[in-house]
Amino acid sequence: MHPPPAAMDFSHNSLFGYMEDLQELTIIERPVRRSLKTPEEIERLTVDEDLSDMDRAVYLLSSGQDIQGTSVIANLPVLMRQNPSETLRRVLPKVREVLHVASVEMQLTAAVSFLNILQEDSVSVSTYAHSFLQVILLHLEHRDIGVSNAWLETLLSAVEVLPRETLRHEILNPLVSKAQLSQTVQSRLVNCKILGKLTNKFDAHSIKREILPLVKSLCQDVEYEVRSCMCRQLENIAQGIGAELTKSVVLPELIELSRDESTSVRLAAFETLVNLLAMFDADDRSQTILPLVKSFCEKSFKADESILISLSFHLGKLCHGLYGIFTPDQHLRFLEFYKKLCTLGLQQENGHNENQIPPPILEQEKKYTSVRKNCAYNFPAMVVFVDPKNFHMELYSTFFCLCHDPEVPVRYTIAICFYEVSKLLNSGVYLIHKELITLLQDESLEVLDALIDHLPEILELMATGGESSVQENKLSSLSDLIPALTAAEQRAAASLKWRTHEKLLQKYACLPHVMSSDQIYYHFLQRIFTIMMTNNVLPVQRAASRTLCIFLRYNRKQEQRHEVIQKLIEQLGQGKSYWNRLRFLDTCEFIIEIFSKSFFCKYFFLPVIELTHDPVANVRMKLCYLLPKVKSTLKIPTDKHLLQQLEMCVRKLLCQEKDKDVLAIVKKVSIPLAGKMCLFQKKYYEKDLLDQEKEREELLFLEMEQLEKEKHQNDGRASSDKIFEKKRRDMKTPTQSLPKSIPISVAGPSSSTPSTSKEIKKSKLIRSQSFNSQAFHAKYGNLDKCASKSSAAGHSPTVSGLVKTAVLSLTDDSFRTRSASSAPASFSPPLPSTSRGAGNSADVKSSSGKDVQPRKATL
C-alpha cells in the first residue's frame, strides 16, 4: 500500500495510487450475511395460520423453540381473559411441564404473567390457589437468585388475597421444616420474608403460637444474612402482635441483635428500633432504647461508612421519637453530632484534582456526600428539634454550609427542603434570605428546578415575613431578589432544559402578589415579551404569554398597561412573522380567561377578527378554533355591532376560503356560532357572575391608581408646608400655627357633602394600601373588611357605615349601567378599540364624586 501523503495531492499518480488501495480493500472485505435466519430455521418457526389461539399456544409449548414458548407465557394473561376454562385445561399443564427445564428468561416471564393474572382478577381466588399456587411454591428455591426473588414477589402478592386456611396448610405448615438449619441459606431467607408477610393475615394468638417460635429460631441463625433479614421483618411482626407482645418478645430480640458481631445485623436492628419507637412507652425509650442509640452513635465513626449513611438518614426520625426524654446535655450532644455529620468530609478537601485521588478515597468521599445529603433531608426535623426560635444561634451556620456544599446532591436536597424550613421559621424567615439568593444563583439547574417547585410560597413568606403583613418591608425585602430571579431565568433559557425554563416562567405568575407594578414592569415584563418573540420552544412561549397576561392584569399604572397592549397588537398581532401572529392568538385566549369580557372587546376584539384575512392558512385555522370563545365575550344588545362584524367575517370565510382544512374547521365551528346569545348567557350564568367580579376588580385598580396619585400630591403639599413652617420658625416671625390636616376640596357634584366624600376617599386609600397583601382573586366583599378596619382605627361607626354604603353603591351603580357603558374611564388610549364604552368616562366621573381629567398615554 502507498503511504498517505502529508497533504492532499490531486496529481495523476496520486489518484492512481488511491485506486490501488481501494482495490486491495475490496479483496480483503469480509462476506456479509444477508439473511438472519436460514430456510430451515424459518421452516421450524412457521406455524399454520388457521390454528386458533389455544391450539397455537399448545403447539408452540409442545414443539416450539424457547423464544416461542416465552412468547406464549407472556401472552398467558390475555388467554385467561379470553377463555379462562380452556386456558386452565389445555395451556396451563403445558406451562408446568415447560417450566421444569425452562431458561431464566422464561422463568422470569412466567413469574410476571402469574402476578398479572392475580392482579387482573381473571379467575377467582380459590381457582388461583388451586391452579397457580403450587407452581409458585415449586420454583421459590430456584438456583438463580433473580428468578427466586421474582417468584417470591408473586407469592407475597398472593398472600394478601388468599384465605387464611389456605395460607396455613399450603404455606405456614411447610415453613416449619424449611426453616431448619439443614435447609439452604436461600431457603431460609425466603422463609424470613414470608413470615413477615403472614403476620398481617393471622390474629395475635395464632402468631404467638405458630409464628413467633420460627421467628426466634431465625433470629439466632448461624448465618448473619438470615439474622439480618429476619431482623428487618420484626417491624411487620410487631405491628401484627401489638404493643404488649412487642415489648415482651420483640424488644429483647432487638436488643440482642443490636450487639451482634456483624455490622449489617446491628444496622438492621438500629433501623427497626427507630421505626418502632412509637410503640414503646417513655420508660422503655429512656431506659432501654436511648442508651442503645447513644452507644450506636458513638461507635458509628469507627465503623463502616454505611453505618453513618443509615444513621444520618434516620437521625431526624430518631430525634423526633425521643424528643422530650433528652436531658439538656444529651440534647446538646445529639445536636453537635448532627452538625458534625453535616460537614463530614469537607475538611479533607484541599483542591486536588479528581483524577489524582485514589479510588478508595474517592469512594469514601461519595459516601460522605450521601451522609451530608441525608443531613440536608433531615434539616426541617432538626429545626423542630432545636425550636425555630433558636435557629439563628444553633443551626444557621449548618444551614449556610449545606446551601454552599460543593456537591450538587446536597444542594439539591436542601433546595427541596427550603420551603419547609421557611414555614417553620415563620417571622424569622428573613434569616435565610441570603441563602435563597445563593440557591437561585446556583450553577446547577437541578438545584434551581428543585427550588422553584415552591417558589411562590417562599416569595410570599419572604415578602410578608411569615404571619406579619407589614407592607413597608415588602419592597426592601425583595429588591435584592430581583437580580437573582432574572439571572435564574436567563440561565435556564440558555440551557437545553426547556422544562425547567417553562416551570420557572409559570411560577413567575406569583410576582404581582409580592412585588410592585414598577418592579415587574422594569425588570421582568420586557424580558417576558422578548421570550414570546424569540424563543423557539412552544411550551415556553405559551408559559411566557400567560405570565405576561397576569402581569398586565395586575399592573396598576395606566401608561404601562397601554404600552403593553400596544406592543401585543403591533408586534404580535400585526407582526411580519406568522409565528408571532399565532402567539398573539394564544395570548388572546389567555386574555379571555384572565380578564373581563369588556376588556377583551375594547382592545383585542377587532385585532383578532382582522386575522381572518391573514395570508397564512395556519393562522386562519387557529383563529377559527378561537372564534367560539371570542363570541362568548360579547354582550347583547351592547355589542350587537361587534356580533355583526363577527358574523360577516364568518360568512366571508365560508364563501371565500380556499384552503380545504380551514374551510372544514369553519363549517364545524359555524354551528355553535349560529346559536342565540340569550340562550348562551342563560347556560353560562355562573360565568357571567365571574365576569362581573373581574370587571369590578379592574375598576377597583383604576380607582386605587387615582387615589394613590392624590395621596402623593397631598404628601408633597404637606412636606412643602412643613419646610415653610420651619423656615418661618427659624426667622422667629410670629405666625399662627398651621392646621395639622389640610382639607381636600374636590370639585364636582359631591362638593356639597365634603365630609362624606373625604371619608370615601380615606376608605379607598386604605383599601389601595392593603390590596397587595390580600389574595388577588378575593371577593369584592373584602371592602366591608376595609371599612371595618378604618372604623376600628378611630372613626365613628356612623361615618364608617356611610363610607361602606357609599363605596358599595358607587361600584354597584357603575356596573349596573354597563349595558350603556361597560369599560372603565381610564382605558382611553389611542389604541384599536370598539365603540363599547363610548360614554363611560362621564359615568365614572359622576359616580366617583370627583372630576377626573382625561389624560393620553405616551406610547
Image (cartoon, grey):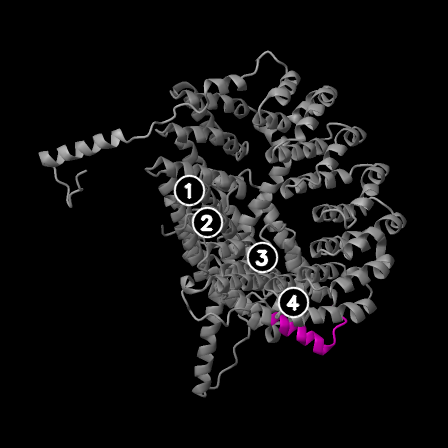
Q: Is residue 158 left or right of residue 104?
A: right
Name the residue that disc number 4 marks.
382
Q: Label 3: few (<14), some or many (≥20) within 10 Å?
A: some
Residue in view at x 54 percent, y 40 percent: 593
* Of the pair 447 and 716, the residue shown nearer to us: 447
Disc 1 to disc 2, C-alpha distance: 10 Å
Q: Is residue 821 magenta?
A: no
Nearer-N-terminus badge (1/2): 2
Distance, label 2 to label 3, CA atoms, is 19 Å
Q: Secondary structure at mark 1?
A: loop
Quarter in which the N terminus is drawn: top left
Q: Quadrant of residue 318?
A: bottom right
The residues bearing labels 1 and 3 have C-alpha atoms spaced at a distance of 27 Å
Residue underneath mark 2? 501
Mark 1: give few (<14), some (14-19) or many (20+) Cα within 10 Å: some
Residue at 53 percent of width and 55 percent of height: 450
For the residues labelled 1 and 2, say whether their Cβ atoms are less than 8 Å apart.
Answer: yes
Distance from Cα at disc 4 to Cα at disc 3:
21 Å
Q: Which residues are magenta?
A: 323-339
Viewer-closest of 384 and 310 = 310
> What distance separates the C-alpha of mark 1 from that of mark 4?
42 Å
Where residue 790 sits: x, y (%)? 64, 64
Write down the residue under mark 1: 537
Q: Which mark is residue 457?
A: 3
Q: Which label's residue is closer to the chain start, 1 or 4?
A: 4
Q: Which secondary structure, mark 4?
A: helix
Q: Earlier in the sequence, mark 1 or mark 3?
A: 3
